C-alpha cells in the first residue's frame, strides 16, 4: 500500500526502508527543514521592505507582506525583524514652543470633544511645528481631515505670523470646497488661530471654530500625530539649506508619501487617499460625488499663497 508521494518508482515508505529510517523520522526532518526554506524567502522580503521603509514598524511591514500575497502573522514578522535588528528606533525630539496663547483674542469652546465622525469634511484639525534650516528656523502649518488623516492644507515659511496659518487654511478650502455649516475646525489656542483674520476666514466659509482646553495635549492628537510622523520619517537627520528647499521636500513628503503611499494603522493599513477613495464607493453620491471636483493640492496651495498675502496677519 502506498503511504506517501512517489519519487520515481519508489514511494516514501520504500525509500525510508532502504535508508534504514522510520517514516516518522523522515517527516520530523521535513517539518524541521521545509519551514526554514519558506522562512528564508519571507526573511529576504522582510529585509527588503524594512530597508525601503526604515520608519515602518513590524505591523506595517506585516501589512505590506499581506499586500504582496503572504499569509503571515505579525508576531512572526516581529520575531524576524527583532532577530535581524530591523526594528525602527525612534529618538525623542526636542520640541520648542510654537503656541502663544497669551493674547487678547476670543477663545472659543471645544466643539471637537465627543464628535463621532462618519465621513470626511466634518472635522478639520490644525497645528504648527518648527523645522531646522541650515541657518535659521522655519515653521510649518497644516490642516488635516480628522476622519481620513489626509493633509488637505499646508504652508511653510520662516515666520509665525497669522498669515502662515491662513495660507494653510486657504489651501484646504480651495482643495475641498466645503459646504457652509458642515465643518468644525479644531486647533490650539495660539494667536494665529484666535486672531481676527483667521476667525473671519472661518466665518466667511461657514466653518465653526473649536479650540483645545488648557493643558490638554490630547484634544488635538491627530494633528500632533502627523507632526510626529513628519519629524520621524522626513525631517529627522536631514538639513534643509533654505526655506525653498524645505518647502519642496516637505511638499513631496506630504503629497507623494504621506497622503498616497504611507500605510496608516488607524485606517486599516490604507493610505489616506485610499481611505477616502474607499469611502466614496460606499457613501451616497449625494454626499460626495455631487460636490465640485477638488483641485490638486499644488494648485490649491498656489491660490492660498496669493490670497493669504492680501489678508492681515493679526
Image (cartoon, grey):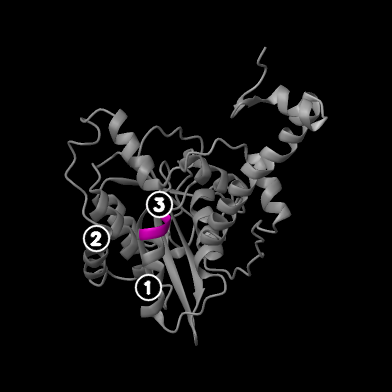
222 sits left or right of 244 in the view: right
Q: Are marks 3 and 2 in contact (CB under 8 Å)?
A: no
Residue at the (47%, 43%) spot, across then down: 68
Is residue 62 in view? yes
Range of residues picked out in magenta: 256-260
Q: CA distance from mark 3 to mark 1?
A: 18 Å
N-term mark: 3 or 1: 3
Q: Which residue is mark 3?
A: 144
N-term mark: 3 or 2: 3
Q: Which quadrant: the N terminus?
A: top right
Residue at the (46%, 41%) spot, across then down: 67
How many C-alpha atoms fall within 10 Å of the one at disc 2: few (<14), some, or many (≥20)?
many
Q: In the rendered image of this protein, does residue 167 appear above or below residue 4?
A: below
Question: Is 257 covered by the magenta stretch?
Answer: yes
Q: SS class of the residue under badge 2?
A: helix
**Residue 247: mark in rendering:** 1
Q: Nearer the viewer, mark 3 or mark 1?
A: 1
Amino acid at each position: 500500500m502506498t503511504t506517501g508521494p512517489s519519487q520515481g518508482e519508489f514511494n516514501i515508505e520504500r525509500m525510508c526502508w532502504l535508508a534504514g529510517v522510520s517514516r516518522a523520522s523522515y517527516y520530523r526532518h521535513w517539518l524541521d527543514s521545509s519551514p526554514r526554506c519558506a522562512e528564508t524567502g519571507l526573511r529576504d522580503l522582510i529585509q527588503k521592505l524594512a530597508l525601503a521603509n526604515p520608519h515602518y514598524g513590524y505591523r506595517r511591514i506585516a501589512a505590506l507582506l499581506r499586500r504582496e500575497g503572504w499569509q503571515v502573522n505579525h508576531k512572526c514578522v516581529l520575531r524576524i525583524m527583532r532577530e535581524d535588528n530591523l526594528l525602527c528606533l525612534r529618538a525623542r525630539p526636542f520640541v520648542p514652543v510654537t503656541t502663544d496663547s497669551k493674547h487678547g483674542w476670543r477663545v472659543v469652546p471645544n466643539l471637537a470633544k465627543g464628535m463621532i465622525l462618519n465621513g470626511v469634511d466634518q472635522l478639520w484639525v490644525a497645528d504648527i511645528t518648527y523645522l531646522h534650516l541650515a541657518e535659521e528656523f522655519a515653521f510649518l502649518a497644516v490642516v488635516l481631515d480628522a476622519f481620513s488623516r489626509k493633509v488637505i492644507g499646508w504652508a511653510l515659511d520662516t515666520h509665525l505670523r497669522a498669515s502662515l496659518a491662513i495660507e494653510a487654511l486657504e489651501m484646504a478650502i480651495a482643495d475641498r470646497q466645503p459646504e457652509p455649516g458642515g465643518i468644525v475646525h479644531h486647533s490650539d489656542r495660539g494667536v494665529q488661530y484666535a486672531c481676527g483674520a483667521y476667525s473671519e476666514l472661518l466665518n466667511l466659509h461657514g466653518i465653526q471654530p473649536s479650540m483645545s482646553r488648557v493643558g490638554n495635549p490630547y484634544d488635538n492628537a491627530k494633528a500632533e500625530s502627523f507632526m510626529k510622523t513628519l519629524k520621524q520619517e522626513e525631517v529627522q537627520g536631514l538639513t534643509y539649506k533654505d526655506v525653498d528647499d524645505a518647502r519642496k521636500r516637505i511638499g513631496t513628503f506630504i503629497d507623494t508619501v504621506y497622503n498616497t503611499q504611507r500605510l496608516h494603522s488607524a485606517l486599516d493599513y490604507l493610505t489616506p487617499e485610499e481611505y477616502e477613495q474607499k469611502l466614496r464607493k460606499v457613501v451616497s453620491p449625494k454626499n460626495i460625488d455631487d460636490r465640485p471636483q477638488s483641485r490638486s493640492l499644488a494648485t490649491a496651495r498656489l491660490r492660498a499663497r496669493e490670497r493669504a498675502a492680501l489678508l492681515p496677519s493679526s
